[in-house]
Image (spheres, helix red, strand yellow):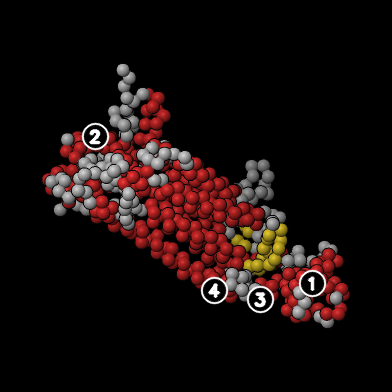
Amino acid sequence: MSQFPAPIYAETVLGPNFEDAKKHFLDALIEIHYAHTRMLAAQGILTASEERLLLEALHGLDLEEIARARYDGSCEDLFFFIEGLLRRSCGDLAGKMHTARSRNDIDITLFRMAQRRQLLGLASAIAELRAVLLRLAARNLETVMPAHTHTQPAQPTTLAHYLCAAIEFLGRDSARIQAAFARVNLCPLGACAITTTGFPIDRHMTARLLGFEGLAENSYGAIASVDYFTESAASVAVAMVNLGKFVQDLLLWSTREFGFLRLSDAFVQCSSIMPQKRNPVSLEHARILASRALGEAQAVLLCAHNTPFGDINDSEDDLQPLVFTMFADALRSLRLLAGLLAAAEVDREHLERRAASDFLTVTELADSLVRHTGMSFREAHALVARAVEASGADDRPAAIAEVFLSQNPSLGLDQAFVERALDPRNFVRIRQAPGGPAPDVVAAALSRAGGEQQKIEEWIRSKQEMLDAARRENRASLG
């Protein structure tokens, strides 16, 4: 008769899962033991003396010994390994700690406890990058630059206006993380295997001691539902798509051909053969790390797809480490990008020259004709297009004005009128509509974004303090 575990099972599943559990979930598991023991005593399911002995046994666990332990097949997993250590201290009483609970609700609880810390870390990294962009935008309210559509130069804007767009999507990323946190931070403990228990447990007490803000109430759903981590994966995926699009622009701006952005020497690497190279590889790392995190988020969703609505391993031991990897790579990308942008330099003069070239301001010439003459925009568009075509490669405002005036003498316009319409600073300044690039409009948007930043940072601090306070209460010294 074969003996558990089969060597290949231990090698491919139980051993790796044991290591993952020690790395990611040991602290949460011990917190759960404390909270559940205190609750059992409060409910009269354990006596005061039994509670004291069990808590002393928990206090006496040697975490370094546990960290050194290697899977040897003597138990199924870390849970039973810890229970074995507790039995050394208090004998069969250790088994009483498992009254009115299951590995099912323990596992989902510790998964949620670990994930909420990952969400707070990600929220902090998003806030850090957003703060860097807020400072950079505030310094560049008047920095005129070309905006692109379809990867081609389109119209003038300002660097602050461009960065405000990124600041806004980071704000939405933060809101998605906060929403995910709210649904992750619900306590499943007390669901037991899947139908709760006949013992008079207090689920609200254990939830409070573990820093949860409510219950994952339905016991079946508490065990079977996986949207607590799929929502987090979706939030990471959206954030990494946003980040990747931004990084792609920054890489183009760092090329010699664009020359808009110069990374600090601390963030570039040389070529082993070409002495002149300043390779912006830190941006490349930020891009691939974002892509990795996106791929990992997609893998999390794929693994959970078309699995039964019940207690299954497909969403547990083998999948949860991938959730950690997803968060880790997203965090690396965000932190790297914040660091390199904080030290980067912008070539303002070059940006302004480019904003005045490539006929980028001719939309405003057409708009000015509509305002001044009352003609339709379509008619004005045609007149300006004809002048652009006749100007050939000469995109200087003065040259365009001369061509336009020679083609349209009946309009009675002068050189100053046309050149003012073609000035990139005028183009930006008169675009006063909400969300536009006018410096005073962007300054107001940045002021609002700064207020939002304070709320984001306060939310992160409050949640961290909440979890820390619960931990202190849960680990309070025996009275």
User: Which amino acid is tagged 4?
Assistant: Ala
Along the line of sight, the residue nearer the viewer: 395 or 220: 220
Q: Residue at x 16, y 38 (%)?
A: 93
Q: CA distance from mark 4 to mark 2?
A: 62 Å
**Where is residue 462 shown, x and y percent of the image?**
36, 61
**What residue is shown with label 1?**
379
Q: Is residue 176 visible?
A: yes
**What residue is shown with label 4?**
444
Q: Mark 3: few, some, or many residues within 10 Å (few <14, many ≥20)?
A: few
User: Which amino acid is tagged 3?
Assistant: Ile
Q: Residue at x 45, y 56 (%)?
A: 177
Q: Is residue 267 visible?
A: no
**What residue is shown with label 3?**
430
Disc count in the image?
A: 4
The quadrant in which residue 12 appears is top left
User: Which amino acid is tagged 2?
Assistant: Gly
**Where is residue 159 shown, x and y percent of the image?**
62, 65
Circles 1 and 4 in contact, beta carbons < 8 Å: no
**What residue is shown with label 2?**
84
Q: Horizontal placement of 183 versus 37: left or right?
A: right
Specify which label sits upstream in the sequence, 1 or 3.
Answer: 1
Along the line of sight, the residue nearer the viewer: 232 or 215: 215
Q: Is residue 468 above or below residue 294?
A: below
